[in-house]
Image: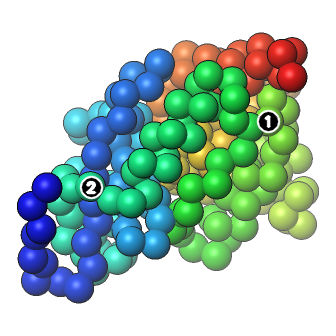
Amino acid sequence: MREYKSIKKNIIATTVIATPIGKMFAASTNKGICMLTFYNEKTIPKLLEKLKKFFDADIMSAQNIHFDTLKKELDEYFEGKREVFEVPLQLLGTPFQISVWKILQAIPYANTISYAEQAVLINNPKAVRAVASANANNLIAIVIPCHRVIGKNGKLTGYAGGIDKKEFLLDLEKNNMCQH
């Protein structure tokens, strides 16, 4: 692969990863994965622009050391052999959003919580809508498992990849728990 010179000091590498629930678009800095989203030609340019500004970086389709780890861990996850991701992440968010995403990462495999429960876990029980908004702004699907958050009534609610993908991921985890 060719080396690219960048006018800016930072480079965000991008790649497309095939998964059992469709193509996913990944981006990474040299410090870690900063985006993993379901492939959508309409939303990806906006998200990349956000990354470009935040990291003051050039974006290019290129190899990155973290993509190999991400691909391996995603494969293991979909095969039911991985419950926790270890790939380094570089989060793009406010301190509040990052605190919400840390709670997401602490939800055990094959478990779910409600947005209200998540708000309590960040010591802000009245912040249910803000928590839901932070979950919606999570740029790293599956690895930061916002699919594990459901409505207080137990129903599946919004998911950037679509409710069908959320249901698939929850079923995958539930079915693989039975095998452990």
| Three-letter amino acid code of the residue under disc 1 | Tyr
Secondary structure at numbered mark 2? loop
Tag 2–tag 1 contact (CB < 8 Å):
no
Give the camera-side residue of 11 and 75.
75
Q: State how far apart marks 2 and 1 are (Cα).
A: 30 Å
- In which quadrant of the rendered view does residue 25 lie? top left
Mark 1 — residue?
109
Mark 2 — residue?
63
Quadrant containing the C terminus in the rendered view? top right
Q: Is residue 122 above or below residue 6?
A: above
Secondary structure at numbered mark 1? loop
Give the camera-side residue of 166 and 23.
23
| Three-letter amino acid code of the residue under disc 2 | Gln
The crowd level at tag 2 (other Cα within 10 Å; few <14, some 14-19, many 20+) is some
- In which quadrant of the rendered view does residue 130 lie? bottom right
The answer, for residue 82, to whether it is visible in the render is yes
Residue 173: horizontal and vertical position, in percent?
Answer: 74, 24
